[in-house]
Amino acid sequence: MPLPQILLVRNWKHLFYSFCLLLALLALPQPAGAQTSETSFRRFTTEQGMSRDEVTALARDKRGFLWVGTLNGLNRFDGAQFKVFKRTDSAAGLPANHVLTNGITPDSLGYLWIATIRGLCRFDPVREQGQLVPLPQLRDQLADNDFVSPVGFDSAGQGWFASIDRLYRIDPRTLRRTAFALPYVIPNECPLPVPATQGNVWLISQGAIYLFDPVRRRYQYVQGQDLTHPNAPEYFQRLVPGRQQRWYAVAQQGVFQYDAAQQRFVAEGARNFNVQAMVETRGPQGQPACWIGTSGRLTYYNPVSKRYTDLVHSPDDMHSYPGGITLALLNDERTGMLWVGTTRGLAVIDPLSNKFKRQFVRSPDPKRYLEDVRVVHQDRKHDSLYWVLTNQPGLMRWQRQHQQLTPVLDPPPGYLYDLVQDKQGQVWVGHDGGLAVYSPATRRWQQRPIWLKAKTLAVPGKVAIEHLLLDRQEQLWLGSAAHGLLLYDPKRNQTTVYPLPVEAGEACQVHRLQEDRRGRLWVLTSLGLFRLSADRKQVQRIRLQASTPTVHQSDRVQSTFLLDQHDNLWLSSLGLVVQADTNGRVRHTYTMANGLRADYTYGLAEDQRGHIWLATDEQLHELDPTTHQFRYYGRSSGLLVNSMYQTFTANRQGELFIGARGGFNYFQPVQLRRNQVPPPVALTEIRVNNRPRPVSDRVELQPGEQTLTVAFAALNFSQAQKNRYAYRLEGFDSGWTSTDARTVTYTNLAPGHYSLHIRAANNDGVWNLTGQTLTVRVQPAYYQTLWFKILLAATGMVALWGIYRYRQVQQLQLAGVRDRIAKDLHDDIGSTLSSIRIFSEVAQVQLADAHPATVSLLQRISTNASTLAESMQDIIWTIKTNHDGLPDVVTRMREFGLRLTEAKSIRFTMQVTEPFPALRLSVEQRRNLYLIFKESVNNAVKYADCTHLQVQLIVSGRQLQLLIEDDGCGFDLTTARTGNGLSNLETRARDIRGQITFTTAPGAGTAVALIALLA
């Protein structure tokens, strides 16, 4: 059986043999070769949460999730995490865990059609439920014939798949199937249908291609080898649809494309390989191209040039092809990403994430790698030739077009620092012992050691050269490790120390050299920054002049500098980078407060747009000086390291190069793609009281459900860890909340309707402002509903009315009792007292002559009876219900006052504010208020010896103010308080929640003031 049929799973025995062969292929060593630096992969395996590393199928659903089929489970990927689905005992689960090659197909309705070793399943990715498609072979109790081919959908939306003995057309809505006979049946083998144009269907059976007409139910042989055509030269393995009705067929002889005029597939490029997957894509200029997955490699095929480019696994390169067998390919035209499913995991080529090209540099000793690549320098004559300076083996020649690195033999000993190339093409290298020059023409080295004599300003001895510069006059300037700036004459092999204004004998290390557009030479040293005039006769020290305290004034912590095309000076120091003019006046300062993330900056470069690039100990920085905004790049962007300790070099095309541990990166800044695709936002989970709910666009919380948790994802797969989110619960939140988290929880929401709005931004900060909306309805408990509140209010009103009626009845009954008591007192006791008074008066007349001594006694009896009758009238008045109003009390007060003062010829006046509020006084209030008035007036008439008695009564709201004043003799309060009169008045005032005060003095009259609250 040919290798391409391995994972089509033609029969059960083949499945067992295929699995064994697959394990054998995985155990084989992978082809060795040079990994092109133009292509980078990101990898995902079981370590990131996949159910298994062997990926057999890939697809995207309508919401944007990536679905990954494996040999042991179905996986949903949102860019950050995997969710695994496996076979369960439920009818809504998968029929099997083993997903067949290319066995996931989305349809226009949003379903996923999963082809497994135990049948075909229609899977709902939103509800996360499947439905098995019933087929005859599922009822025979045999497990070796349940597999089917992947499903393909035609332009009418109908699905096509094949079993071992039938070709089926299926309606994705109703699952209604129409069966067609195959051109021939081979026991336990399953052909592969692919929908074609005009309602026809391609069918690959064994190694031949047929075209099926469903209307006529006829098969037309097209091409290829099978049982009925054993002598055909091609053995086809796969059919792949392309754009604009292009059709590709892959055979062991290479790639074929369908020619409608010839009605056959024509060879595109001759190459023998076993293809497992293929997909069409767009080339750099928009032309069609193909990715082809085989064993041990991924191949890029350019139909225009008929050229194949292989990508293979490199053990030391985490961004290389993962290796193994490529079983599935998925091209995302929207983002340009290519997903690659292999037997060693899932991988993706992401031009929006892996922005940097790379080249690894290996030591001749296979057991070790280079510590650093110092410099990458383009040859002065050949654009595709570069000189690479490393620690070991030293100088290397890089043929970029062929991605070939060749060490230059016999490099100078020791540590190599920098290189330049002169007009003759000679390569000058600075090292520990001075200089060395390499001639590419003769392929020989010349050593130029540099020694300084004691009479020089620097410390005498052997000189290490760390930096080299050829100026416009082809003068070779040397930056030493401790001896300052040197000028070297190659013809005479003489070195001159250029005097810098530093203290004699002080070690001076040169950090960087640059010549500006005016021919001036700039030198950054461990002692500061210096500028040499164009004629090299004058030198000036450049110090930063800044008003802000964030700029370090010490010259000894400056690490590197750059002069850009606008004559701006960029200078780095500890924790900051400044932009200044050429005289050192600082224009702008960048620190951690406004975007700089690093403490140390080791390299500065300017690209063709004027952006400044910073190689730092914390990622690569890109700065736009016009907006002062930074962007950051690290290993996830394709860089070899996150911390960069080397300087930049640039070629004539504007590309930037920077060395790293074990290799170097290079890139064209103006071609770096920014991710402009707003990420779709999808809900991934809804939990209520920590119990899962089906994912939909609405959720309802019942009474007692107090916690709502919603998980979501931005379906941006380029550096998904940089995705950002913002959410707002309309009806609850006043504004948007930004977060990196992918869940939000709300508790104790009040009953009502809410809308949870979720937005997301991709790795480059492009926001999807439409986002996703979840409608939330919180059902009220019965006691929170309107009807319950109305019922409760009605019940309360009824209860209050009942209480009111009960009190009203009680008050009526009490009033009846009071009136009856008043009547009885008046009729019985009152008449009796009247009789006593009358009888005593009669007795006085009759006994006045006979018993004169008894007259006084009878007078006292008559007086007491009269007083008692009068008090009885007061009690009767108090008890009677028809006197409960305040006007009744005022009337009785006025009557009493006039009657009492008139007998003593005292002028009585009473001022009352009317009308009174409609207040009814209790018996206690009426009685105490009247008795306070009566006692006060009685005291004034009897004891005050006054001529005028004035009463003032004011009612404001429920507050009553009573003032009784006389112009009598007054009295001493201290003496009066020994009796009970005043204390009785105070007690009565307290009984009606009032306060009484007395104002008096001997000869100054008396004033009694009462303030009380009426019920």
Image (cartoon, helix red, strand yellow):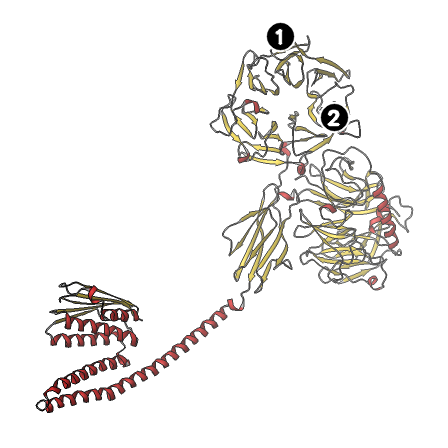
Let me know if residue 261 appears in the view: no
Dot 1: element? loop
Direction from residue 244 to residue 707 in the image, left or right:
left
Q: Nearer the viewer, residue 953 or 999?
A: 999
Let me know if residue 994 appears in the view: yes
Task: Give how far across and how far down residue 493 sits, in percent.
Answer: 69, 9
Q: Nearer the viewer, residue 864 or 487?
A: 864
Dot 2: element? strand
Place residue 94 in its image quadrant.
bottom right
Place residue 471 in its image quadrant.
top right
Note whether 316 is above or below 872 in the view shown: above
Q: Nearer the viewer, residue 417 or 516?
A: 417
Residue at coordinates 54% horizontally, 32% vertically from top-left?
591
Q: Which residue is mark 1?
A: 455
Residue at coordinates 62% horizontally, 8% vertically from top-left?
455
Amino acid at pointer 1: Lys
Amino acid at pointer 2: Trp
Labels 2 and 1: the sequence-earlier one: 2
Q: Nearer the viewer, residue 583 or 484?
A: 484
State the separation of the CA atoms marked 2 and 1. 43 Å
Note whether 945 is above or below 197 in the view shown: below
Marks 2 and 1 in Cβ contact (< 8 Å):
no
Task: Give how far across and how far down residue 927 sits, in percent.
Answer: 26, 76
Task: Give how far across and how far down residue 132 sits, in percent.
Answer: 76, 61
Residue at coordinates 67% horizontally, 12% vertically from top-left?
461
Task: Give how far across and how far down residue 130 sits, in percent.
Answer: 73, 59
Q: Which residue is mark 2?
A: 398
